Image (cartoon, rainbow, N blue to C red):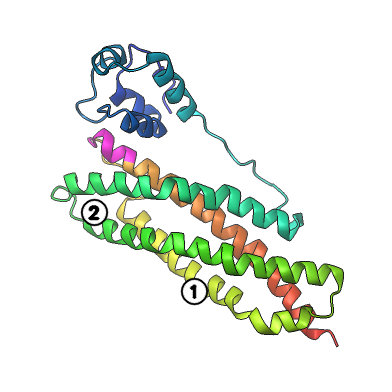
Amino acid sequence: MSPSVLINENACAADIVRAYYRTARVFRKYDIEYCCGGRWPLKMVVEEKKLDGPKLMKELEEACRVLITPAGLPYQTWSVDFLIDYIINIHHEYLRRSLNPLLEQVARFVEEHRKKYPELEELSQHLQFLGKTMIPHLMQEENVIFPYIRQISHAYESQEAYATLLVRTLRKPVEALMHEEHETIEKLLIRVRELTHYYTAPENACTSHRLAFSLLKELDQDLVQHIFLENEVLFPKAIAMEKELLARP
C-alpha cells in the first residue's frame, strides 16, 4: 500500500488501484476504467458519468480498509459450535462473496495477456477447477459435515447413549473430506504460486496484471487459514471425539 496515493478527486483510478487493489471492485461497479486508460482525475470522471462524487469517495475509502486476524488466537480452546460458526461466517462468506468476481477479473486479465504470458493458460485452467469445486465443497460442509460434527459434539458433551450409533453411521465423510478434497486444493495452490512466481508481477506489468495477482494472493491466504482451521483444529477434535465414543462400552 502506497501512502503517497490519497483517495481524493484529483487522484486517478489507475494510481488508486495500484496502491489499494480492493478499490477495483468499486471502479468496476461504476464502469470506471482503472487500467492503462484510467489516467483521468476522478473529478473529471465523476462529472462525465454524472456520478455521486461523495458516495464514490466513501465507497473507495471503505474498500481500502484491511481487517487483519490477530496472530495467536486460541483456536484450540474454542468450542466446536463457535469454531464452525467462525469458519462459516468468515471463510465461507469470503469465498461466496469474492470467488466469482475474483475469477472473472483473472479471466479477463488472462484473455488479454495469454499471448505475452503463455503460462497463464494453465493458471486459468486451475482457477476454473477451483471455481467449479469450491461452492459445492462449502455446501457439503455446511449441509453434511458440520451438522454431523455438531451432533457428535453435543452427544459427546451430554453423554448421550445414541452417540456411538451416530459415529458408526456417519464418521466416514469427515476423514474423506480431510484427506482428499483439502489435499487437492492445497496442491492446486502450490501450482498457482509457482505459475505466478508467488504472486509477483513483472516490473513492467500493467494495473490489471498486478490486481489479478493481489486478488489471488488474498484468496491463497484465506484458503490457507480456512484449511488450517478445519484440518488442524476442527476435524481432529471431531475424530478424537469419534474414537472416544466408539471406545465406550
Q: How many marks?
A: 2
Residue 235 picture quarter: bottom right
* Marks 2,1: beta carbons within 8 A: no
Residue 161 picture quarter: bottom right
Q: Is residue 245 left or right of residue 122?
A: right
Picture coordinates of residue 198, whole percent (x, y): 37, 50
Helix, strand or loop for disc 2: helix
Helix, strand or loop for disc 1: helix
Q: Is residue 147 left or right of residue 152?
A: left
Q: Amino acid at mark 2?
A: Leu
Q: CA distance from mark 2 to mark 1?
A: 26 Å
Residue interval drawn in magenta: 204-211
Q: Is residue 179 visible?
A: yes
Q: Is residue 67 left or right of residue 110?
A: right
**Which marked residue is nearer to the observer: mark 2 or mark 1?**
1
The quadrant the C terminus occupies is bottom right
The residue labelled by disc 2 is 120
Q: Main secondary structure of the magenta part?
A: helix
Residue 84 picture quarter: bottom right
Q: Which mark is residue 180?
A: 1
Q: Looking at the picture, does residue 121 appear above or below residue 61?
A: below
Q: Quick one: label 2 or label 1, which is nearer the N terminus?
A: 2
Q: Is residue 169 left or right of residue 1?
A: right
